[in-house]
Amino acid sequence: MSRIFITGMGIISAIGNDVANNRQSLTQGKSGIGHSELLQSRYASILPFGEIKISTTDLKEKLGAKESGITRTDLLALHAFEEVIANSQLTEAEISSPRTALVGATTVGGMCLTDELYHDANKQDQGSEYLSSYDCGSVNIYLQKRYQIGGIINTINTACSSSANAIMYGARLIRHGLADRAIVGGVDSLAKFTINGFNSLHILSNELCAPFDENRKGLNLGEAAAFLVLEKEEVTGNKTKYAALTGYGNSNDAFHPSSLSDNGDGPFLAMQEALAIANLSPDKIDYVNAHGTGTENNDLSESAAMIRLFGIPPAFSSTKAYTGHTLGAAGAIEGVFSILSLYNGELYAGIHFDKPIPTTGLRPILSYEKKEVRHVMSNSFGFGGNCSSLIFSKA
Amino acid sequence: MFYIHDTICISPQTSYTDIDLGKINGPVENKLLAKEPSYEGIPLGILRRMGRAVRMGVGAALQITKQNLDGIIIGTGNGGMEDCIKFLNQIIEYEEGMLTPTNFVQSTTNAIAGQIGLMTKNKGYNCTHVHRGLAFENAIIDADMLLTENSSAKYLLGAVDEISAYNYNIDLLDGWFKKEKLTNENLYDLNSAGSIAGEGAAMFLASKEKIGASAEIKAIHILHSDNEQMIASELKKFISKYTSEEKLNLVLSGENGDNRLQKYYSTCETQLPEKLAIARFKHLFGEHASASALAVWLSCQIIIKQSVPKHLLKFPANNAGINEILIYNNHKGIQHSFILISRVDG
């Protein structure tokens, strides 16, 4: 079976507008979470957020997105998409080839436009320009149209594991000969909808999130977009191969609609399956980019699953302390961070951590390190019990 | 590709039990609303919290998940839209006050597959495809890949979408539904923009096991384009690659009465073998993102019964049996799919 390589990355998040700036923040241990400047919500001044400090109007201007009905979610996706295309040096012909797939993920879609959606869903008079922009599919339909992408197009929503599943689906399309190349990733923008949703579940922290810390108080929401170009070996030419995607697993925790089981069945099974696909034993994993949201429930369940799988877990940290939890984008941005770790031979520090959870004793790595890294695991778990795990390996 | 065993459908028609496609249930205020069963398999406390899409999806799926399954693959354009806007309305009306999370948790589009996994304790593969009018088609592609990876596996494959007052309003404002008074009879003849709203859930057991199968999904092709010539030429290629004039007996056309989309169906018809029977289904199920899943269920029924209800036919069938059915569906003029379904020999 031919190997699947990552030949391009594009990202925008609270810690940078491109890959280089994201990496710089990670190496410096610099979080992007803090006071929001753009968000319109009563929680804007009360809770910290991982906000991208470019207004929707400026994004439109910068990207030349003049179509009507374009949302912030579309624009963040477009921003990362432009970078990934340039980074992988894809030509127009390659993008429009029927052998090029697009698999994106989002959970919010155009629902970031709360007031417009409220009006359009409830009022009989003239609709807004966003009538076709609310659903999850709209983001990738927009990218397809703008770039005339010619192959299979899909959108996945498995809550917070959405873009890990998009990466997995793209890799499988290549494995099965349904595409030679798949542009895969995800996006979510900050939205009153998700802020109020997570707030109603009492899992938003009013402090900076502290993944795996004994006194963690919950998650901080963030916004981001990221894409990867996955290519089968035969079409990579002499492009830079940043990493290989070698493993993926998807499993359901089947425990509760909005929380994970204490022993982490779903996370355990997803990680175990990813190792089996990659044909690796647990001890070969050098670094785990954990889901690590900073909620009481996730970090405990994920720790239990890591202990079950690894015995003594390898170096791990959660980069959500830098970006916030970016929901449908999380699997994709953390995919980029995992690849940067492999490609540059470095591990990113867990920040805002003080004391380990007494029952697990697990400590994330606490300082930036240069280190030879051969295999990285990236975890993403979501509501509905949707758990996924990916393994990236040195190219 | 793979075989379809059990098929369960909750739709505006008599499709769940005592299936009767001879008589047609009409729209209420221009909406083809699903005839929901009493959902005896779902505990009342859980049922009460479920929105319409979750209820229909889970209710249909539970009839299939009595089997031991390797995973759950669901397509939905909007998921629980009603819960979603209910929650959104509370955000606005209570100015982001303290809200209850039930609607929020039910509104995520993966709540259907998640709930099925939870209720059946299924820890296998679980995925929700939400690519609007091609959500179910991507679920089919996913199922096909999974069954190629593990040929002894069995998966729940299905799709569901609901009419809520809210998505109906959004699509009405966007011009996708007709404003004239609609009946099952006049839908195709009004020569105006828009179609009729519909909803439903169709669930299937998918496996590589031929014995006892109801039908086979033989091929699928999806594309995004607004160019009818390109769609028609892709259709021609699809037919010559996967079927033949001898084997293909029926086309199920996604025609929906929207005169702006008629060019796609008319141009595609010019590529079909002469005298091929053409049937339509949107007067039964309405227009929605999961309509093609209901068309797959209908194809299975036609293959099992070896007859096409008369009111479906646009061009009549010859007397030969039904071996292969081609579904051509088009969602909002930009998302297109061809699905080939075949009778199982022996």
Image (tube, grey):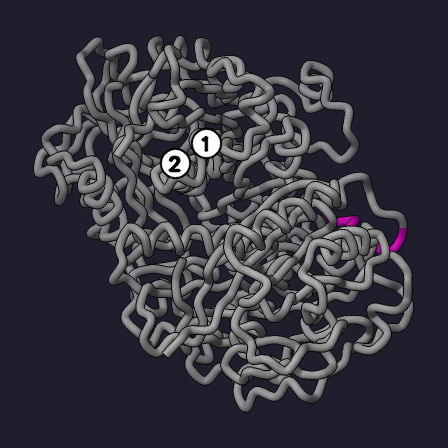
Location of residue A9 (image quadrant)? top left
What residue sits 35% from the left and 9% below the top? A28
Please tell me whether residue A330 is drawn above or below residue B182 in the rendered image. Answer: above
Residue A159, image x, y percentages: 46, 46
Residue B250, image x, y percentages: 63, 69
Label 2 marks which chain's residue?
A
CB under 8 Å between callouts 1 and 2? yes
In the image shown, does B313 or A381 lie closer to the viewer? B313
In the image shown, does B55 or B149 lie closer to the viewer? B149
Tag 1 residue: A182
What residue sits 55% from the left and 29% below the top? A97
Regarding residue B46, the answer to whether it shows in the image is: no
Location of residue A140 (image quadrant)? top right
In the image shown, does A279 or A325 lie closer to the viewer? A279
| Highlighted range, magenta | A115-125
In the image, is residue A118 part of the stretch drawn in magenta? yes
Regarding residue B196, the answer to whether it shows in the image is: yes
Give the position of the C terminus of chain B as an image quadrant.
bottom left
Give the position of the N terminus of chain B as an image quadrant.
bottom left
Tag 2 residue: A174
Closer to the N terminus: mark 1 or mark 2?
A: 2
Disc 1 element: strand
Q: Does residue B51 appear left or right of residue A251 in this picture?
A: right
Residue furthest bottom in the image: B18
Q: Main secondary structure of the magenta part?
A: helix
Label 1 marks which chain's residue?
A
Looking at the rendered structure, which numbered label has been put on residue B125? none
Disc 2 element: helix
Alpha carbon distance from label 1 to label 2: 7 Å
Q: Amino acid at mark 2?
A: Ile
